[in-house]
Amino acid sequence: MEGHASAPGAGTILNALATGTGGAFAIDRETTAAVELTDDHSITGAIEGAPDADTYLIERCVELVVEEYGDGEGGRVRTESEVPMAAGLKSSSAAANAVVLATLNALGREIPREAALDLGIRAAKDAGITITGCAAGARASMFGGAVLADNTTTELLHTGEVDWDVLIWMPDERAFSADADIERCERVAPLADLVADLAFDGAYERAMTVNGFAFCAALDFPTDPLLDALPHAAGTSLSGSGSSYTAVGEREALEKVQEAWDDYEGDTWLTTTRTDGARMG
Ligand SMILES: Nc1ncnc2c1ncn2[C@@H]1O[C@H](COP(=O)(O)OP(=O)(O)O)[C@@H](O)[C@H]1O
Ligand SMILES: O=C(O)C1=C[C@@H](OP(=O)(O)O)[C@@H](O)[C@H](O)C1
C-alpha cells in the first residue's frame, strides 16, 4: 500500500508569537511525501538530502493517521522538499500536511481536509517544533491562498485570495521557531493587533510590512532588507520567526528588490503565491 501527496510552504502576514493570531499565504514551493504501509508495526522516516535531520514529525504524522483510520500498520515515510527547513517558510506544515495526506492515500481513505489539518498540527505539537501550533501556516499550506487563524484554537478567522509574485531571500543561517524569544514577541502585541486589523480589511501587503518591522525588532533581525524592498515592493516582511524575508508585488518591481537582496549572503529566488493547497496522489 503506497500513497503520495504534496503540500506548499507559506510566507507570513502576521507572526502569531505576540497574540496567538497568525496570518500566512501559500507559496509555489512544495514538499512531496511518499508513504509505504507495511504489516510490521514500526514506522521509519527519511528526508531526501538531509540524512541527519529529525524525522520524528513525519513518523508521528503516519502514526496518528494509522491510529485514527488504519489497522495497526507500520510504514516507511519519505519526504522531498523545495521548502528549506527552519527558514520561516513553514517547511514543517508542508511536510506534516503532505505526510498526513500521503498516509490517507496509502490507506485509500478520503477525509475532510479540516480533519487532516488537525492531525498535522497535533503531530507538530507532539514533535515540539512549534510554539502556537502554527495553524495559520498549516491552513495556508493545506488550502492555499491567504489565511488568518487563531493559532491557539486553530479556528479559521479569515481567508482571502492573493495573486502576487513573491521574492524570497534566505540567509545561510537557520532559525528554529521553537527557539524564538516569546517574551520579546509579546511586547509588540499592539502592533500585531494592527497587522490583524489591516489583514482583516484585505490590506495584506501593508499588514505584512508592519509585521516585518515589528518582528525584526522583537526577534533581533535586521530591518535593512525591508528598507531595500520598500521602494519597489507592495509588501515585505521577515517570514515566520526568520531567517527568510519575503517581498510581494509585481514581477518587475521584485526584480529590483532582488538586485539589492543579491548583495547579501544566501539565496534569493522568485516564486508566486498559490491558490490551491495540498494535493493527494
Ligand atoms: N521535509 C521535511 N521532512 C520532515 N520533517 C521536516 C521537513 N521539513 C521540516 N521538517 C521538520 O520541521 C522542523 C522545522 O520547523 P520550524 O523550525 O518550525 O521551521 P519552518 O518555518 O520551516 O516550519 C525541522 O527541524 C523538522 O523537524
Ligand atoms: O512556532 C510557532 O507557533 C510559530 C512560529 C513562527 O513561524 P515559523 O515556524 O515559520 O518560524 C510564527 O510565524 C508563527 O506564527 C508561529
Image: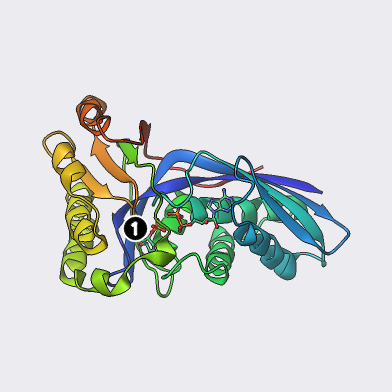
In the image, residue 185 sits, relative to residue 213, either above or below, namely: below
Q: Which quadrant of the structure image shows residue 148? A: bottom left
- Crowdedness near tag 1: few (<14), some (14–19) or many (≥20) residues, C-alpha within 10 Å: many
Quadrant assignment for ligand 2? bottom left
Q: How has the structure been colored for display? A: rainbow
Q: Position of residue 25 (x, y in %)?
A: 36, 49
Q: Position of residue 200 (x, y in %)?
A: 23, 60
In the visual, does 166 lie left or right of 126? left
- Name which residue lies at 25% across and 40% down: 247
- Name which residue lies at 43% across and 58% down: 176
Inspect the image, locate mark 1, and give the three-letter code of the amino acid beneath it. Answer: Ser
In the visual, does 204 lie left or right of 89? left
In the image, residue 8 sits, relative to residue 158, either above or below, namely: above
Q: Is residue 209 visible?
A: yes
Q: Is residue 146 visible?
A: no
Q: Is mark 1 within 8 Å of ligand 2?
A: yes
Q: Position of residue 233 (x, y in %)?
A: 18, 37
Q: Nearer the viewer, residue 107 or 126?
A: 126
Q: Nearer the viewer, residue 197 or 124?
A: 124
Q: Which quadrant of the structure image shows residue 126? A: bottom right
Label 1: which residue? 241
